[in-house]
Amino acid sequence: MRIKLIVTQPFGQNCYVVSDDENRAVIIDPGASEEKISLYLMQNALKPQAILLTHGHFDHVGAVNLLSKEYNLPVYANIYEKGILSNPSKIYVFGGGGEAVKVDNWFENGDVLEFGDLTFKALHTPGHTVGSSCFLLKDNLFSGDTLFRESIGRCDLEGGSFETILSSIKNKIYTLDDNTNVYPGHGDMTDVGFEKIYNPYVRGE
């Protein structure tokens, strides 16, 4: 299994391309830079299977429609994120405009999403948005804008809640093994054990 980080611009958002030994790939949060993502897929002879979204803000979904059309890919998102992803004014929360995101499959907390040898468990972790989610793949967690290295996602936008995001982290993420790698939506990777000790917003028990 390979996990490739592609930082998309201009907002420095982390897109991840995860692939198995048969070159089947899943794209997580393609926020922009669709040509950069496509180039990586082509150069590595990858066969994309799906797009997974942690939430619906523009910096995480900007290239979704282009990539899903180019590769005929199904798009997956949490059912509670439908209100954002179907409304461009809520996707492009700071203005600028754009399209709604076409989602083919809505998942709920605990759903298992399988693509070849890649099996993700969807964890509903509201607080940044109402439908924010993380994806657990073996000992790797793709945390979107819920948990960052020594920080958490902002809670001042529509659907955000400081108390809710802390609960999501404590009750969903901090219950995972301390050695679980955390791949956030922005910034450097971390792990659950490190965040329990050093995250100033939410400490572990």
Image: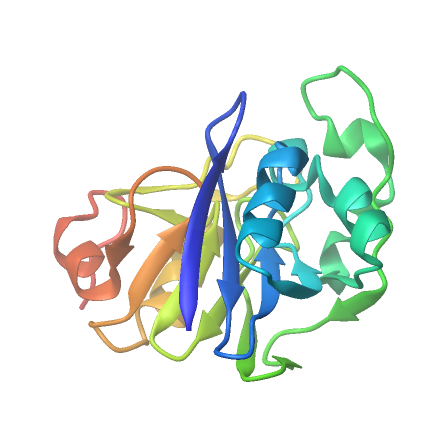
Residue 91, relative to residue 42: is it above or below?
above
Left or right of 191 in this view: 154:
right
Percent across and percent down for residue 34 are 67, 37
Left or right of 74 in this view: 139:
left
Percent across and percent down for residue 53 are 64, 54
**The one of 201 and 173 positioned closer to us in this rendering:** 173
Left or right of 69 in this view: 77:
left
Q: What's the residue at 45%, 56% (across, down)?
A: 143
Residue 148, relative to residue 191: is it above or below?
above
Residue 108, relative to residue 129: is it above or below?
below
Percent across and percent down for residue 96 are 76, 15
Q: What residue occupies the far top of the structure in this picture?
A: 96
Q: What's the residue at 20%, 63% (across, down)?
A: 204
Percent across and percent down for residue 198 are 14, 49
Left or right of 202 in this view: 8:
right
**The one of 92 and 44 positioned closer to us in this rendering:** 44
Can you see residue 155?
yes
Can you see residue 84?
no
Q: What's the residue at 55%, 50% (across, down)?
A: 43
**The one of 41 and 170 positioned closer to us in this rendering:** 41
The N terminus lies in quadrant = bottom left
Q: How is the image coloured?
A: rainbow
